[in-house]
Amino acid sequence: MRNYKIGCFVAVLLTSAFLIYAASQNNSIYIGIVISLFLFWFFKSVFFTSEEDKRENEERNRQYEEAQKKREQLKITAIEELKKMKIDKMKAEWSKYYKRNQFSFIDKLSGVEFEEFLLKILKEKGYTNVRLTNETGDQGMDILFTDSDGKEVGIQAKRYSGSVGNSAVQQLLGGMLYYSCQKGIIATTSKFTQSAIELASKDSRISLWERNKIEKLYYDTMPSEIPPFSIEKAKQIGLSYHTRLPRFEIEKIFKKYDLDYRYDYKSSDIDQ
């Protein structure tokens, strides 16, 4: 190893001498000197690092690794605390979700709240891919889902006080065509005109849900008592997705463990 170092040193020395000579021939001797000094510095740092320097480097690396491990452990602890907070909030929402009210509460719902109420019933009945269209110009369709036969179904929700007429049936047919639905439903908090009932009866794919039918679905579907909390069920009915922790609470927990939530936190970390 010693002979190898001497050989490398001689090579660096000769190279430097050549560079200085070549640079002097081009009136650039200072460039040659700078390059030579760099070569000597590089040679020293590679081959002549002292044992003390090596030990210091090793100690710094060890301390860095320990600090990283400690930080990761603190992050895990913070995330677990946030998960517990989220579960506590989900349990509170769970109680609200399954609390059965007198059906008259439906009259106090807004149009959007009525759509969300229907979503709850559909999810609880076990239908899949239940979602709002959430489109501007939704072509007369508010909710889409897949029924037990695997057919795509669309619902037009009518939060009305008066009777629903023919135009709603016509809009539903347009929405079924637009969303490629095999079945269509009009759900209302009131009732249908006789002409709307007659028009809908001409197409076996269309169902009309008036107030009495929705009330029966509500009481038949929602349990009479609040069931035990289940994370899997909470995922299924959407509570996990809709339950969010305020930013200040997340920041507070991370600050408690001397962490910065901006760098150490992702929303997926606490998804249940």
Image: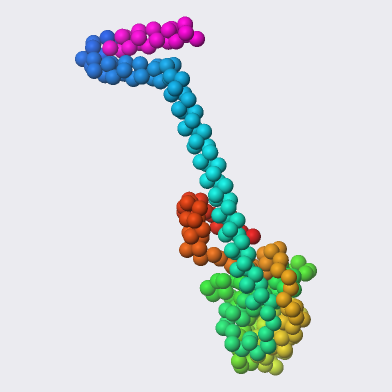
Name which quarter of the figure residue 16 lies in.
top left
Q: Position of residue 173 (x, y in %)?
A: 66, 78
Q: Main secondary structure of the magenta part?
A: helix
Q: Residue at x 47, y 23 (%)?
A: 54
Viewer-closest of 242 and 117: 242
**Left or right: residue 240 compared with residue 19:** right
Identity of the residue drawn at 34% across and 20% down:
38
Q: Is residue 153 left or right of residue 88?
A: right
Q: How many marks?
A: 0
User: How far from the left and from the top, in percent, is residue 184?
Assistant: 69, 77
Viewer-closest of 139 and 87: 87
Q: In the rendered image, which quarter is residue 232 located in?
A: bottom right
Q: Is residue 94 above or below residue 160?
A: above
Confirm whether the magenta stretch covers residue 16. yes
Residue 22, relative to residue 41: is it above or below?
above
Q: Is residue 236 above or below residue 188?
A: above
Where is residue 109? Give x, y as percent: 59, 84
Q: What residue sits 57% from the left and 47% below the top?
A: 73
- The range drawn in magenta is 1-20
